[in-house]
Amino acid sequence: MGTVVLILALAAVFLAFSAIKVVPQGYQWTVERFGRFTRVIKPGISFLMPFADRVGRKLSMMETVLDVPRQEVITKDNAIVSVDAVVFIQVIDAPQAAYEVQNLNQAILNLALTNVRTVVGGLELDAVLSEREQINARLLTVIDAATHPWGIKCTRIEIKDLTPPADLTAAMARQMKAERERRAAILEAEGEKQAAILRAEGAKQSAILQAEGQREAAFRNAEARERSAEAEAKATEAVSAAIAKGDVNAIRYFLGLKYVEAFGQLANSNQQRTVIVPTDLGGLAGLVEGLRTLNAQTGGSSGSGAR
């Protein structure tokens, strides 16, 4: 009797474990009844019919990352590049993901490999190296459309690495170096051009200022000569008036002035090493006396005219 009770207890435990299922968060399980899909159980506790129902596929509903193996692709201009990528997928329909395709992850990887080869092979090398975002967008569109009947949403696909051959990489490095040297030469030439322009502009402004200074100096010199000529004309007029009146002092002043000018030119001559001093210093004294008398007479006349 005890053995029968033990067997019944074990059978009850077995039935309980086979009928009660607990699905963890982030997963969905399919339920099959006699091998046919009937429903999906979601996270939490669920009850199955013993001996008739069983768990079919356990599917993760979380986003999954698949590494696309590296492969060599021939571009449109016959360059060989090594390409690998990563694909981000998420199951959005558990029954379709479970029963529409065999070996889901392998199918998605093969699909990604072929489409990477197609998209990259349709572009030239420069476009492949510079338009990675466009390549990712094209791959995402194609793979998402292909996996939609499988209940899969392809959220992202990223080209992880693009590696040209070593000789092509060296050629690209030389090309980049030449381009940078060309830009440096252009910048240097532009700098020299700007410097030459600035120097020319500075020389121009300097010449303008110098010409303006010379013009101002010439104007000042002309004004000084004009005033000197006016003063000399007034003096000559006064001397002429005095000579007309028969004043001997005026004649002495005029002759003495010429005498002093001639003596000064003789003393300042570059060819003259010996200065001859005249012995007749009385003539000079007479010149001074005549000048004093002439000035006194001129002043007296001016005072009389004013009265």
Image: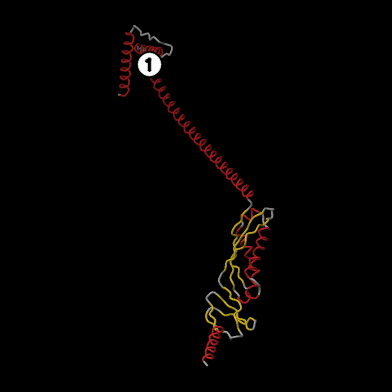
Expressed as whole percent of the image width and height from the top left, the position of residue 124 reads 67, 54
Crowd band around label 1 with a 10 angstrom C-alpha radius: few (<14), some (14–19), many (20+): many
In the picture as drawn, the residue positioned furthest to the bottom comes out as 1
Which residue is pictured at 63% across the width and 63% down the height?
139
Residue type beneath disc 1: Val
Residue 292 at x, y = what percent? 31, 15
The quarter in which the C terminus is drawn is top left
Helix, strand or loop at mark 1: helix
Q: Is residue 51 above or below residue 135?
A: below
Residue at position x 65%, y 53% in the image: 125
Residue 183, quarter of picture: top right
Which one is in front, 56 or 205? Answer: 56
From the image, tell me which residue sits under label 1. Answer: 239
- The one nearer the camera, 56 or 270, is 56
The one nearer the camera, 139 or 53, is 53
Quarter occupied by residue 185? top right
